[in-house]
């Protein structure tokens, strides 16, 4: 009996391996693309609701620096054009607030206190209970609080606004990691970069749209001026929630309308572990040099990115004398370029990997280096350009636009290493990234408090340049691109069952079949 069982077992293994080579490829539009599109809009909402305050702050704050005087150029400021009428004059003056630079920095960074706090817990919750509801209700709560922001600021004061922003950060942090958790389940290996990068570019599209639109709304009389930015983008988030709630499912296995062919294709190389069956390998994760390399690299990269998206509008207004509408339009351009480089990078990275020209880790390091070093090279020339607006705008567009290539480099490499625990890993990585979001706005606020000069901003740009270089070196030395041992589920076999029991097939997708 034993010999018969052994023989049957060997035949079964051979059959499984043969069939594992024949997993059907699904090339048409499918459920994974619907997930990607709504994830794209979800990221759009997360960033639009986060950064509309960065532009609105210029109109909301009505504080005069102690150094302001007709000879502002003596303090490193650019001359104020005669025809540059500050949009605050057209805004609702009853809704202005006397916030100095330090207070503005505290308000802008308050979102990140909550955002950082829920990165790891959000990852743990999404691993155990799934990500759909964390994403959907997280963005819905954020949207509602955004709509209420003008009322909170006007009626309850600065600390109420700070508290509201902290709460928005809390739900946003959980939502962000939950999307990553679902990406680990919905993206097959050879589409991992493109689908993930496509979804992630929604964040940059959020900036492309929210910055100029917020600038325009702040300079208009629509819905009271700057409050319109909060009402409109909050409303968009509420509408998105309906589509997400009714069209998206936690995994391919729970989707009622997915084809069996697409389901097999996705599950062949995507994370499919049962949430309650396997404990999180904390020791393996926290002792992995590759994971720490990603965490440090994204911290350094995010420092410079947050300087641009969070406080650069203030620099362009106070130093370069751009009005608020110009501020929003200017900052939208580099984000548009970032969208294009993100999409191009995603397609190009997967094409190179499929062709076998470079290994996965070589692709990740190449795109990360091109991205961060290009941004670093542009920064020191911004203060050196003085008041030459054409040169300054060009440097900002090129430098920040190249950050899109990070989406095909360091920002997706955690899926190569541990896609089965993508929610936890995104929590750790985004925690590290957004520590920079907590520190950098406050750092700028303290450095420029009642001292808003070009010299102070020169220091800020040089620090960002150094961080970009440090991030590049860290990832080049310690980055990895292969699946970690702690990511493999027991026996490293993932079973894929066809919904039709009459045609049920098991696919052995162990590591040796995908080297």
Image (cartoon, grey):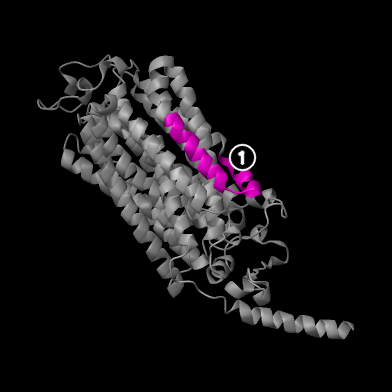
Q: Is residue 343 on the magenta stretch?
A: no
Q: Report the side of 1 relative to 233 (left or right).
A: right
Residue 430 visible in the current orientation: no
Image height of 450 relative to 430, above or below: above
Q: Residue 490, located in which quarter of the rendered image?
A: bottom right
Name the outermost residue toward the left.
82
Say which residue label 1 marks.
121
Q: Report the side of 271 relative to 437 (left or right).
A: right
Q: Which residues are magenta?
A: 119-146
Image height of 431 relative to 500, above or below: above
Q: Secondary structure at mark 1?
A: helix
Coordinates of residue 507 in the picture (x, y in percent): 65, 73
User: What residue is drawn where x is 42% and y is 31%?
Assistant: 146
Coordinates of residue 159 in the picture (x, y in percent): 46, 18
The quadrant the N terminus occupies is: bottom right
Looking at the picture, tell me which residue is in the foreground, 97 or 143. 143
User: What residue is drawn where x is 16% and y is 38%?
Assistant: 388
Looking at the picture, tell me which residue is in the foreground, 101 or 86. 86
User: What residue is drawn where x is 72% and y is 79%?
Assistant: 13
Residue count near mark 1 (Cα–Cα under 10 Å), binned few <14, some 14–19, many ≥20? some
- State whether the magenta stretch is mostly helix, strand or loop: helix
Image height of 282 relative to 409, above or below: above
Coordinates of residue 172 in the picture (x, y in percent): 50, 38
Coordinates of residue 420 in the picture (x, y in percent): 61, 57
């Amino acid at each position: 009996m034993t010999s018969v069982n052994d023989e049957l077992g060997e035949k079964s293994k051979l059959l499984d391996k043969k069939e594992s080579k024949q997993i059907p490829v699904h090339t048409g539009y499918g459920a994974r693309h619907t997930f990607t599109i709504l994830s794209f809009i979800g990221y759009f909402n997360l960033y639009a609701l986060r950064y509309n305050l960065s532009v609105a702050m210029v109109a909301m704050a009505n504080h005069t620096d102690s150094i302001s005087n007709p000879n502002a150029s003596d303090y490193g400021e650019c001359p104020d054009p005669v025809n540059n009428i500050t949009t605050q004059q057209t805004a609702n003056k009853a809704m202005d607030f006397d916030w100095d630079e330090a207070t503005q920095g505290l308000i802008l960074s308050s979102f990140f206190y909550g955002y950082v706090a829920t990165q790891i817990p959000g990852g743990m919750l999404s691993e155990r209970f799934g990500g759909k509801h964390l994403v959907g209700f997280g963005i819905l709560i954020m949207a509602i609080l955004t709509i209420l922001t003008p009322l909170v600021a006007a009626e309850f004061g600065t600390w109420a606004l700070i508290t509201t922003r902290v709460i928005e950060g809390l739900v946003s942090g959980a939502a962000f990691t939950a999307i990553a958790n679902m990406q680990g389940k919905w993206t097959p290996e050879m589409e991992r970069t493109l689908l993930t990068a496509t979804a992630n570019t929604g964040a940059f599209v959020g900036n492309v749209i929210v910055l100029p639109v917020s600038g325009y709304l702040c300079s208009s009389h629509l819905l009271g001026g700057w409050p319109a930015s909060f009402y409109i983008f909050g409303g968009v988030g509420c509408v998105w929630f309906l589509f997400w709630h009714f069209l998206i499912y936690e995994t391919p296995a729970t989707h009622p309308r997915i084809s069996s062919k697409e389901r097999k294709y996705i599950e062949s190389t995507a994370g499919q572990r049962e949430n309650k069956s396997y404990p999180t390998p904390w020791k393996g994760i926290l002792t992995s040099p590759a994971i720490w390399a990603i965490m440090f690299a994204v911290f350094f990269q995010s420092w410079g990115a947050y300087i641009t998206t969070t406080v650069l509008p203030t620099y362009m207004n106070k130093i370069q004398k751009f009005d608020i509408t110009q501020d929003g339009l200017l900052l939208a351009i580099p984000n548009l370029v970032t969208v294009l480089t993100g999409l191009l990078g995603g397609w190009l990275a997967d094409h190179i990997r499929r062709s076998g020209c470079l290994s996965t880790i070589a692709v990740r390091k190449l795109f990360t280096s091109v991205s961060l070093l290009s941004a670093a090279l542009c920064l020191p020339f911004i203060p050196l350009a003085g008041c030459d607006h054409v040169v300054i705008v060009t440097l900002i567009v090129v430098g920040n636009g190249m950050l899109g290539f990070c989406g095909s480099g360091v920002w997706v490499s955690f899926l190569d290493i541990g896609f089965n625990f993508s929610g936890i890993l995104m929590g750790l990585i985004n925690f590290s990234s957004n520590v920079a979001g907590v520190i950098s706005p406050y750092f700028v606020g303290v450095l420029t408090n009642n001292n808003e000069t070009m010299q102070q901003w020169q220091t800020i740009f040089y620090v960002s340049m150094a961080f970009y270089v440090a991030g590049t070196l860290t990832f080049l030395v310690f980055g990895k691109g292969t699946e970690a041992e702690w990511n493999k589920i027991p026996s490293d076999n993932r079973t894929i069952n066809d919904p039709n029991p009459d045609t049920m097939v098991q696919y052995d997708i162990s590591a040796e079949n995908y080297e």
